[in-house]
Amino acid sequence: MDDSVCHLQTTGFALRRAGYLVREACHAQAARADLDRNGPPAVCVIDHIMAGTDGVQLIQQLRKRRDTRQVPMVLMSTAPALHIRDMAQKAGAQAWLAKPFAPEQLLAILSIVLSR
């Protein structure tokens, strides 16, 4: 989930190219609607800064849902690295990623969180 259409498309392209089935949402409400309609994904990659509900709040909300309580979550942000890590951990994310990042970095993180 990312509110930047360009970043959403770029990330989605990289994940599809790597063989992932990708579901995209540009804000928290769209993400929750997708989950209600299609069920939980294998992993959620969530941007920190979004209009309305931010990524930290969304992760906290998803942790309260029975169907997404155990889904691995990755928080991405342009905030300083230590700040992201702390926010991600407190919210319940398994990993964090500082933007901008190379697609290989995202793929490496997803490999780690999906193997746990």
Image: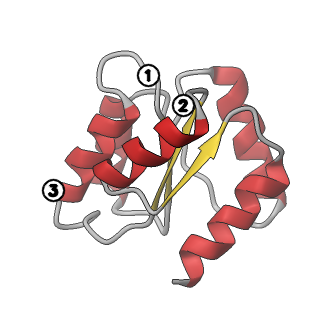
Relative to 56, 112 lies left or right: right
Which amino acid, mark 3? Lys
- Callout 2 touching callout 1 (CB < 8 Å): yes
Helix, strand or loop at label 1? It is loop
Relative image position of residue 89 (x, y in whole percent): 37, 54
Is the residue marked by circle 1 packed among few (<14), some (14-19), or many (20+) residues within 10 Å?
some
Three-letter code, disc 1: Met
What residue is shown at x 24% (from left), y 66% (from top)? 67
Picture disc at residue 64 = 3
- Who is closer to the viewer here, 19 or 85? 85
Residue 22 visible to the viewer: yes
Secondary structure, mark 3, is helix
In this view of the protein, which residue sits in the foreground, 57 or 83? Answer: 83
The label number, if any, that marks residue 50 in the structure image: 1
Residue occupying the far bottom of the picture: 116
Decide: is 2 above or below 17.
above
Mark number displayed over residue 2: 2
Query: What whole-number distance in Å separates the C-alpha atoms at marks 1 and 3?
Result: 20 Å
Mark positioned earlier in the residue sequence (1 or 3) = 1
Residue 45, image x and y in percent? 53, 49
Decide which of tag 2 and tag 1 comes sooner along the chain.
Answer: 2
Of residue 96 and residue 36, the one placed in the foreground of this image is: 96
Q: Label 2 is placed on what type of residue?
A: Asp
Q: In terms of sequence position, does the residue under pointer 3 or pointer 2 come before the other?
A: 2
Can you see residue 46? no
Distance Cα–Cα, label 2 vs label 1: 7 Å
